[in-house]
Image (cartoon, rainbow, N blue to C red):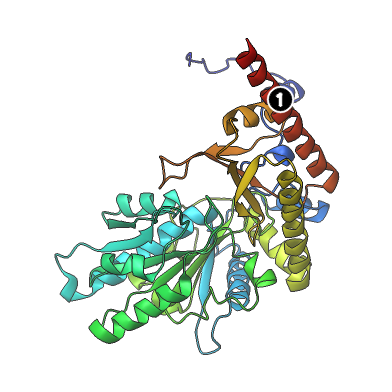
Amino acid sequence: MDKLSFPQQGISNQEAYQQIMDTIAKDAKPNKNLAIFATDEMDEYATKLINNSLAINFPNVTQYPNLAKINLEAALMLADLWKINPTDTPWGTSTIGSSEAIFLATVAAKARFNERIENKNKIPNIVFGANAHTAWYKAANYQGIELREVPVRRGEYSVNALDMQPYIDGSTILVVGVAGSHQTGYDDDLVSINSLLESLQQAHGWDIPLHIDAALSGFVYPFIRQDYAWDFRLSKVASINASGHKYGLVYTSVGWLVVRNKSYIPDSVIYKIKYLSGEFEQFSLSFSRDSSSMLAQYYNLLHLGYHGYQQKSQSVTTKAKFLVHKLSLLDVFEFVYPAKFIPIVVLRIQHNINLKLDDIAQFIQQDGWYTSVSQLSYQTTSSKIMKIVIRDSLSYQQLEELVTCFKVAIDSLTQQQNSVSEY
């Protein structure tokens, strides 16, 4: 990229605005970008709330004590949603997406490990499946924590207790269970992993916590899988993260870390900061940031409530299944994840069909539709998959248009292949 000079003279606000809008107009439109999970619309009151809170610096709780109160209230609402035990003392905080929540979970786990004198000179480790999010690798590497990646068996999309057991020992500070993989939508076998940790504690005295990465599912499973125990109902679950800017229905970027008991966070990582005529506690990786996303999340919790979120979850899941049905009629794809619970469709080309997902993706992109095509990070020799993220803002008419684009792409690419073969 060529170097740019700092502007000597400014331009009008209208010109500056238009220049920027003209530039980003060439990028994907959020409502047709089905490669990412980010929420693409909120209502007028949420937008007004966001605009009115952009100037409020979140960490300054001495000046904004009610902001801190709202932050904790939202976290405690989520603890209740995720079936916290009445005898527990939950605590939590908003974060800049699930990545910061994951970092904070590992910070707390390492601090607990280091506080025990018997662990002096030991290297802590974290155990998670190869289907886990990249943030877990970063969190471990940046903090000098040994990373123990559990291979995912070929043909499988998750890990279970038998897979994990050989990797766990007395220096394991955290075991991670994925509830809704970002690559395929599948869950780890969380019940069996919880039972394994219970048995290891009985056999060896290892009190190893289980963290649930619910970035995708935290705002979906409570509303459509009420009888499924993935949350604080599991005895070893000490903490859960979720992304509010995914199916929490908030613009980027907000995540949540909720712990079963406040004592789970060591005092050594809670910073007491004297600033601007006051003192406050902080558990985060950043300092200054605006309050808009956190308040937008709180707004959704108040406005939608349980039944509103349930309606949204059921609606978007139904739309995802509708897309699966329509695409299946094309008789080209097999479905790795047919929108079972998480509202995503993951597919690949049937083995007897000579088409490439990359070509199809590029073809439909001409009409503005963006999807994610890749290989599974843990099965790099397998065929590529396409992930299509469904949001409730998509209408059935738009989904029909998307299917039509797929059909046109398939017909055109097939015709091109036939022409080449005939030649």
- Residue 185 showing in the rendered view: yes
- Residue 60 showing in the rendered view: no
Residue 311 location in percent, x, y?
Answer: 78, 66
Q: Nearer the viewer, residue 405 or 302?
A: 405
Q: Which residue is mark 1?
A: 366
State which quadrant residue 104 falls in.
bottom left
Label 1 crowding class (10 Å Cα cut-off): few <14, some 14-19, many 20+? few
Q: Nearer the viewer, residue 264 or 70?
A: 264
State the residue at coordinates (64%, 62%): 341
State the residue at coordinates (81%, 37%): 401
State the residue at coordinates (63%, 32%): 361
Q: Nearer the viewer, residue 241 or 350?
A: 350
Q: Quadrant of the C terminus?
A: top right
Residue extending farthest bottom: 87
Residue 421 location in percent, x, y?
Answer: 61, 16
Say whether residue 210 is left or right of residue 399: left
Say whether residue 113 is left or right of residue 343: left
